[in-house]
Image (spheres, rainbow, N blue to C red):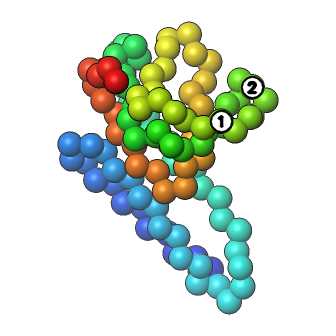
Amino acid sequence: MPFRAIYTVVFAQTLSLWLAVQNRATHPIIFDEALHTYFAISDISTIAISGLAGTTYIDKTEAARRKPQTAALVTINAGDRQAPLVDAGPLQAAWSWPKQTA
């Protein structure tokens, strides 16, 4: 195998996801990943996401423009077509329910 991937999920006070990939080939390899979480949420307006301040996200509603995330808490309105894609490198974020205000 040219690579080794270990996916770790920890269920605690916050949900933690880690993906570690090791290149075992003698040459560089290209590796893409996408980690998706799916939560059954009855009311999206009660959810807030923390831990993204200072990261960069891709706003697909504005021609995939990269933008800095400045808010301490990110909320998603029921009318939003799509949440921004985060391009944060090692990402540590937490869901907060019910929604807390900054």
Q: Amino acid at mark 2?
A: Glu
Q: Is 52 rendered above or below residue 26?
A: above
Q: Is 78 left, or right, of 58 in this rendering?
A: left
Residue 1 as seen in the image, left or right of residue 65: left
Q: CA distance from mark 1 to mark 2?
A: 10 Å
Judge depth for marks 1 and 2 and give the one in front: 1
For marks 1 and 2 on the same chain, the one whose residue lies earlier in the sequence: 2
**Vertical placement of 1 versus 99: above or below?**
below
Query: What amino acid is found at the position of numbered circle 1 in the picture?
Result: Lys
The residue where tag 1 is placed is 67
Residue 54 drawn at (x, y percent): 51, 43
Please say whether residue 97 is visible from this viewpoint: yes
User: What is the quadrant of the C terminus in the image?
Assistant: top left
User: Which residue occupies 45% across, 22% down?
Assistant: 75
- Which residue is painted at 47% across and 39% down in the image? 53
Q: Which residue is mark 2?
A: 62
Name the residue at 60% across, 24% down. Answer: 82
**Is residue 37 shown left or right of residue 56?**
left
For the residues labelled 1 and 2, say whether their Cβ atoms are less than 8 Å apart.
Answer: yes
Outermost residue on the left side: it is: 13
